[in-house]
Amino acid sequence: MSSIESFLKNAVTPWMGPKGEYSNIVMSTRVRLARNLKGSRFPLDFSREEAGEVEQKVAAALEGMEDFSHIQMETVPAIQRQALVEKHLISPQLADPERPGSVILSGDESVSIMVNEEDHIRIQVIYPGLHLMEAFDRANDIDNRLEESLPYAFDGDFGYITSCPTNTGTGLRASVMLHLPALSITSNMARITQAVARLGMTVRGSYGEGSDALGNVYQVSNQITLGKSERDILMDLRDLTERLIEQEERARRALREHSQMKLEDRIWRSFGILTNARVLATDEAANRLSDLRLGIDMGIIPDVDVSVLNELMIFMQPAFLQQYAGETLQPGERDVFRAKLIRERIGMGRQSGGGED
Amino acid sequence: MICDNCHERPASVVVTQSKNGKTEERHLCDVCAAHFQPFQGDFGGDPLGIQQFLQNWFAGPGAFQNTAQPQVNSGPECPNCGLTFRRFIERGKFGCAECYGAFRKELPEVFNKVQGGHTKHEGKVPATYSGRIAAERKIKDLRRQMKEAINQEEFERAAQLRDEVRELERSLEEGGGQDVVD
C-alpha cells in the first residue's frame, strides 16, 4: 500500500552507485522515450475521463510485469512528490498537484514510466556512469512490450507523435550527467556550451541555470529527435560525451601542472568546511561537494567514498532533507541540519574507507 | 500565512533562493511550489523555447502569403480536438494525434525549424507499421544498390536486384510485406 515509502527510504538509488564507465566524471545516463495513444487528446487538453482511460490502458498493458509499483500522484503528499523529483524519478511537471498522473517505478528505481505527464507515456531509464546503449535497450524493451497491447500514435512521415514538436520522431531524449569542475574552474564552460549547441545538442546545469551550474554538474542531451535513427542519436551523444571527458581530463592535468598548490588548498579548504561547518546552504554545500569530488578523483583526498557524495547531492535537497528529518524544517533549520548530515556522512565515509589518518 | 505567489492558498512551503550573494525567502503553497523548483533542472523539458522559435511564424514573410487577410487566418483546424494551426504555433504544443494529419502540409516547415532541418522520421517503427515501412525502405535500398551495380556494369547482379524489388512491390500491393522482410 505505502510502496512509495520504499522509494523514499534511501537517498542512494542504484544509478548513483560507483559503477559504470567513466564514473568519476559521468555521474549518470538517462534515456527517455515519449509515446502517445491514438484516440485520446494529449494531457495538456484532455478531460479527467480521458486521463483515467489512458491510465487504465497503460496499467493493463503492464499487468504481469513483476517488481513494478504503480503510484498515483494524487495519493502522494506534496513533500514526498518533491522528494521523488529531487531523486529524478519523476519530473516537476508530474509533481504538479493540480494535474492527474501516475508513475510506475521498477524496484531498483532504474525504470520510471510516467503516465499522463506532457505525453501519455514517458519511459525513463537511468543508469550509473556512461551507458547510453544499455539504457536505451532497456527502455526499448519496455516500449516493445507496451506496443503489443497499446495503440500507439505513429505517423509514417513524422514517426512517433508527441505533444511537443521538439520530441516528434523517435521521442528519444538521451542525456548524460557530467561533473566538470576543472572546465568550470578554467572558465571553459561558456565556450563549450556554444560549441555543443552547434552540434544539435544542449548543455545545461543539472541543478540550477545556464553556465552557473550548481556543483559543476552539467547535463548534455540531444536536441534533435527527428530525421536521425535512435542509434545515430545515441552514438553522436556518446562521441560528444567522450570529447567532453577528454577536455575535462586535460583541464585537470593543466590545473595540476600549473596550480597544484592552489588546487590542493581549495580542495582541502572545502573539505574543512564540509567536515566542520555548522550552517550550510544548498549552493555552498553543492560547490564544496564538487571540490571534494574533484579532490577524490585526483587522489588529493584519500579515504572518502564517492558514492557518499552522490548520496549527499540528493539528500541535501530541501524535500529530502525534511523527509529524512521526519519533520518540516524552516530554511535556517535546514541549513543546520544539512551541515550536520554532511559532517556525519563524510566522517562515516572516511572511517569505513580506511580509518582516521 | 498566505502564499507569496498566488495570494490565495495558505503557504505551506518555504523556498530560499540565493542570487548574487543575496538570499531571498518565499512562502508558497504546495501548488505554486510545484512550479517553482529552482534546484531541479528540468529533466525532460524543451531544450529550447519552441514558442520563441515559432512565434514569428504568422508575422514573418512566407507563411500564408497568398491569403488576403493573414491576421485573421488561423490556418487549418484539427477536426478531432479543434486546435487551429495558429493556436498550435502560439503555444508550441499539439492537442492530439490527429493534429499531425490536419497540419500535414505546414509541419515540414515547423520541423525544419525545431528539428535542425529534418522533416522525416528515420528511427524505430512499431511492429504494426513495420511490415509496410520496412518493405518500402528495403525497396529504396535495393534500388540504390541496383544503380550502383549498373554503374559498375555488373548487369547480372542488377537484374537480380530488380527481381527482388519487383517481388517486394508485388507483395506490398497485395497488402502484405511482413512475410518478405524479416
Image (cartoon, rainbow, N blue to C red):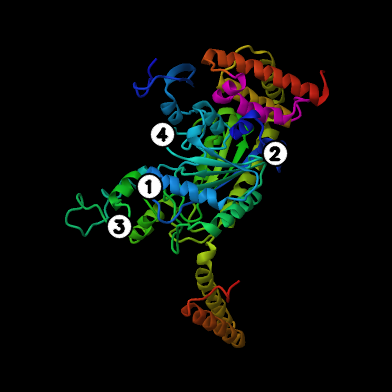
Q: Which residues are magenta?
A: A298-326
> Which amino acid is tagged 2?
Ser
Which disc is residue B79 wearing?
3
A325 up-or-down from A151: above or below: above
Q: Quick one: label 3, few (<14), some, or many (20+) residues within 10 Å?
A: few
Q: Earlier in the sequence, mark 1 or mark 3?
A: 3
Q: Disc 2 is attached to a residue of which chain?
A: A
* Marks 1, 4: nearer the viewer: 4
Q: Nearer the viewer, residue B39 or A111?
A: A111
**Spatial CA span between label 4 and label 3:** 28 Å
**Spatial CA span between label 1 and label 3:** 16 Å
A325 up-or-down from B140: above or below: above
**Most common secondary structure along the magenta stretch:** helix
> Which amino acid is tagged 1?
Lys
Q: Are the residues flagged by discs 4 and 3 in contact, CB closer than 8 Å?
A: no
> Which amino acid is tagged 3?
Pro
Q: Quick one: label 4, few (<14), some, or many (20+) residues within 10 Å?
A: few
User: Mark 1 highlights which residue?
Assistant: B93
Q: Position of residue B175 (x, y in %)?
A: 48, 76
- The verdict on residue A304 being magenta is yes
- Element type where label 4 sits in the image: loop
B7 up-or-down from A49: above or below: above
**Spatial CA span between label 2 and label 4:** 38 Å
Q: In this figure, what is the number of numbered marks? A: 4
* Marks 2, 4: nearer the viewer: 4
